[in-house]
Amino acid sequence: MPHSGLITLEQFIVDQQSLYKDAGGSLSRIFRSLELAAKVVNRDVRKAGLVDILGNHGSTNTHGEDQKKLDVIANDVFIAALSKSGEVSVIISEENDDPVFIEGCENEKYIIAIDPLDGSSNIDVNASIGTIFSIYRRSSVTQAPTAEDCMQKGKHQVAAGYIIYGSSTMLVYTTGLGVNGFTLDDSIQEFCLSHPNIQIPQNGKVFSVNEGNYADFPQGIRNYIDYCKVKDKETNRPYGARYIGSLIADFHRNLLKGGIFMYPATEKTPNGKLRLMYECNPMAFIVEQAGGMASTGQGRILDLVCTDLHQRAPIYIGSSNMVELCVNMLNESAVTAN
Ligand code: AHG
Ligand code: MN
Ligand code: MN
């Protein structure tokens, strides 16, 4: 058996393609574009402290030149690469208020949602950041695409994944046949299979939440956070608190080690903070494929109806036993309160 590190992403995708009955190579071409964009953004992230790409979009550098924020650069790079694939008719991006319709690709069947740079508040302090992507198929390609074509439930995703620009750069994705992770080997500039068939442990020892907002959380979530901190040998409590403030980094750690990530609704933000199309849905698809769970607190994330391309959703995601207990505590306390 060859060393798993010798299987490149490209080879892996070609091998997997034969498992689909309508495999025409379109998805492979999209992945090739995503891979290329990921390498370009990775290069820019790696030199972010050396060249003028930190700071605010719209500000000027010492030479009086416009500075570009890294998330604007990442957005431009992913949109350009995906447009060139010739397979994508629309791109939904966190950085664009309206859907980006790709000229000349009106009849192509794929729709992509992206968060080009997730965790952007961490850029300037050199902590892990990432890119999130989600792929849908249009139900019909006889007409030019509309925004409504993009408003599909998460359960209809064809593929989803993320790139984490961390201590090493990884691409993790699913097409509904499990989850696989690839690490970028800098010396050959190839993503190589390093984490085949990722399974999230059913129980974890980590809870991830912005606890600064504790006072605003629903009572059930406060109860669950308190529960995480109680000493109990049998259930390995107290759990560790780990929160970077970069969904990708928090999610990736919990996916590999087990744990729960929460971004609850509060009275001020009844839909939480994270965006359904390019944050919650792709992560939910990945976690379910890895044997975990993702809930809004009321139901499965992947069943949520999309009414606005930039809508937000509360999210509880990670190890299945932890998410189940958290959601039960949330709902029990809601019932008692009524
Ligand atoms: P983005 O950088 O794409 O705007 O996303 C930031 C998100 C997410 O990555 C993270 O989990 C969350 O914001 C952190 O929010 P708080 O600072 O409110 O905890
Ligand atoms: Mn984000
Ligand atoms: Mn972002």
Image (cartoon, helix red, strand yellow):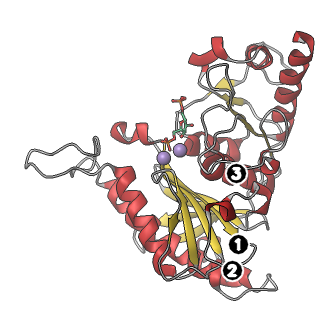
- Disc 2 marks a residue whose amino acid type is Val
**Circles 1, 2 touching at the beta carbon (< 8 Å):** yes
Question: Residue 172 at x, y = what percent?
Answer: 62, 60
Where on the picture, by quarter, is residue 18?
bottom right
Q: CA distance from mark 2 to mark 3?
A: 23 Å
Q: CA distance from mark 1 to mark 3?
A: 17 Å
Q: Is residue 204 above or below residue 211?
A: below
**Element type at mark 2:** loop
Q: Tell me if 35 is positioned left or right of 281 in this view.
A: left
Q: Name the residue beneath numbered marker 1.
A: 138
At a point 63% along the width and 27% down the height, the residue shown is 209
**Element type at mark 3:** helix
Q: Name the residue beneath numbered marker 2.
A: 141
Q: Is residue 336 above or below residue 309?
A: above
- Residue 155, which numbered label? none
Please name which of the two marks, 1 or 3, marks the residue nearer to the observer: 1
